[in-house]
Image: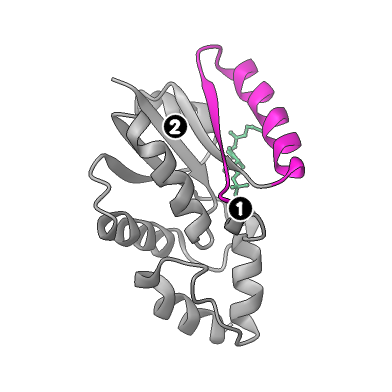
Amino acid sequence: MRIGVYPGSFDPFTIGHLDVLKSAVGLFDVIYVAVLNNSAKHPVFSVEERQEMIIKAVSEEHLENVRCGVFDGLLVDYAASVGASYIIRGIRTTTDFEYEFQINALNRHLSESIRTVCFMASPGHSFLSSSNVKEIGQYGGSIEGLVPQCNEYFIRERLARQ
Ligand code: PNS
């Protein structure tokens, strides 16, 4: 079985994240979207909210072989716990590449068998990040087309109350 883990803060899950997931889905038997539970990052959305939004988006897209989990601690330990040998990541810019390059080396140091597979973001998503979505939403701007439509109302209402 080819099992992958797609980790991130997903605060919130964007259409850029969904695009990476859709690119990866055919290459793996199972993908675990793994939400980082790290309060030190001061997420806007609770880990339950983030997980719920991902499950909704995945279900709308009929991505049958995708599961959603939560982890804290080391990513390689979570990957081992679900039997995954691959980490899936998206790259938008050369800055992302530098970061992924370093994290890959550290993860390989921690677990020799783990491999990272990176997908290039679609050109239309190269500007998109969860932080941008939060900033736009908090100032009352439109987040239409930036997050999965099924989560747009919830995210907009939540950010407006920040
Ligand atoms: O998309 P993000 O929010 O930048 O994701 C970062 C993430 C979750 C992939 C990274 O912070 C992570 O793997 N954290 C878990 C801690 C860990 O394993 N660290 C070892 C590598 S430094």
Q: Secondary structure at mark 1?
A: helix
CB at disc 2 and ligand 1 closer than 8 Å: no
**79 vs 25, nearest the viewer:** 25
For the residues labelled 2 and 1, the Cα–Cα distance comes to: 31 Å
In the image, is residue 112 above or below residue 48?
Answer: above
State the quadrant of the C terminus. Answer: bottom right
Q: Amino acid at mark 1?
A: Pro
Q: Is residue 102 magenta?
A: yes
**Residue, x 59% and y 57% (percent of image)?**
125
**Residue, x 61% and y 72% (percent of image)?**
134
Residue located beneath label 1 in the image: 123
**156 vs 97, nearest the viewer:** 97
Q: Quadrant of ligand 1?
A: top right
In the image, is residue 8 above or below residue 13?
Answer: above
Which range is magenta?
93-122
Residue located beneath label 2 in the image: 78
Q: Is residue 105 magenta?
A: yes
